[in-house]
Amino acid sequence: MSNPILPSTVVTQAFASVVVSLPDMQNGRGRDRITAGIEKLREETRRTATQIGYAEGQSEGYDKGYAEGLRLGREEAARNAAVESQLVGEALAQEIATLHGRVETEWQGFLLSSEAAMVEQCLGTVRALLDAELSL
């Protein structure tokens, strides 16, 4: 009797879609939550593989069942690794986009401040020249 591991890639994707959209991504805590969630999923996959190995070991002979459970666990871990790398890539892309937006905003603010300062300096110079001209 075989007990297949349920595809946790679906769970991983659902988890990540919620975590990636968290506002905490702006300050890095979302990335920490993703890492913690992925570690938890890895541990659950290992635990499930061991449980399946034990259950199959009881029904089909311990060595054969345990080996099959470990094989299934490794396959699931490989599938999860692919999903994890995709999720990490998406999280990093979102983090980079957030940082890019912040840099763009800061740059625009700097340009406006610089232009305002230059205009103010020019007006000050013009005022000084006018005052000097009027006092003559």
Image: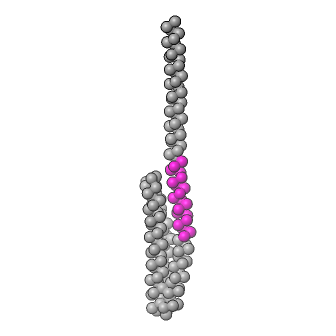
Q: Percent position (x, y) of residue 50?
A: 46, 82
Q: Is residue 126 above or below residue 84?
A: above
Give the residue displayed 52% in from the left and 24% down from the top: 121
- The verdict on residue 90 being magenta is yes
Q: Is residue 77 magenta?
A: no
Does 34 appear above or below 120? below
| Residue at x-position 43% and y-position 55% | 24
| Residue closer to the observer: 55 or 62 | 62
- Left or right of 55? Residue 122 is right
Q: Nearer the viewer, residue 132 or 28?
A: 132
Residue 113: image location, x then y, percent? 50, 33
What's the residue at 52%, 90% (across, down)?
A: 64
For the stretch drawn in magenta, what is the main secondary structure? helix
- Which residues make up the magenta segment? 81-100
> Is any part of residue 2 visible from this angle?
no
Q: Position of residue 115 (x, y in %)?
A: 53, 30
Residue 122: x percent and y percent? 54, 22
- The answer to whether residue 36 of the structure is visible from this angle is yes
Q: Can you name the residue that lies furthest to the top here?
A: 136
- Residue at 51% x, 54% y: name it: 95
